[in-house]
Image: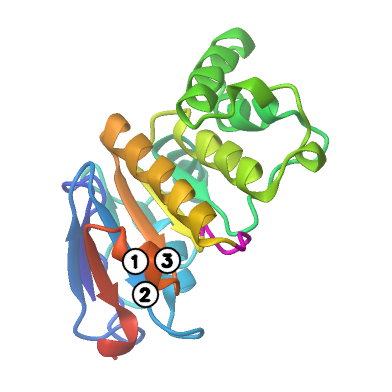
Amino acid sequence: MTAVLADSIVGKINTHTVFPRTAFSVERGECLAITGPSGSGKTSLLNCVAGLLPPHEGQVMVGGEDIYALPEKQRTRMRLTRMGMVFQFAELVPEMSALENASLPLRLAGTAAALARVAAMDQLRATGVDSLAERYPHELSGGQQQRVGIARALAHGPDIVLADEPTGMLDRAASDAAVMEVLREAAADRGCALLIATHDARVSCAADRVLRLDELV
């Protein structure tokens, strides 16, 4: 498989033994949906791009660098500073407020607390949950938690956002549409690439393009 992501910010991926005859690209501000049934490899592909699952062959390039040629410490740093992750169940830290959750990647990257809070609050505002900044995850609805998770993924200005079933915890089509709208608008505003793994047709229909893994193997 060969992939070019985020206008060569993330470059070639080749995992012939897992995803043969696969080639795709994602430009800045564009949304690509990765679809397929359970077990087709959607999450594995995201993990490969994130530097968590080395490909059997080939490369994953970020800013001209093969991330799997980097030492683990540098790969972790790249994942923290240049990638944003949105999870199916938000995965917020329960002991932290919405604002603290949204600022967490910045703080882990060494950004001063005050600056991290400002950036996180700006993104909470962009995702429509700034009024909930001081609430804790258990005080938020599923959709609100996911919006905080999106804010966390975008607050540090990543080059690419990887979203794994971002509407999986929601039970209404309207909620799916709202989360997708937030993701699309935020990614476009930030100028980053958006790669979404999903089995939800409503989500894939909202993407610019769709890649079906089960049609490639």
**Residue beneath the point at 34% across and 66% down:** 204
Magenta residue check for 169: yes
Tell me the kind of residue under disc 1.
Answer: Ser
Q: Which residue is tagged 2?
A: 35
Residue 113 in sight from this viewpoint: yes
Q: Residue 21 carries which label?
A: none
Q: Residue 204 carries which label?
A: 1
Q: In this view, does 118 lie above or below 90?
A: above
Kindly state the secondary structure of the residue where label 1 is placed: helix
Neighbourhood count class around disc 1 (C-alpha, 10 Å): few under 14, some 14–19, many 20 upward: many
Colour mapping used in the image: rainbow
Tell me the kind of residue under disc 3.
Answer: Ala
Q: Which residues fall within the magenta stretch? A: 166-171
Percent position of residue 64, x then y? 20, 45
Q: Which residue is tagged 3?
A: 197
Q: Are the residues flagged by discs 2 and 3 in contact, CB closer than 8 Å?
A: yes
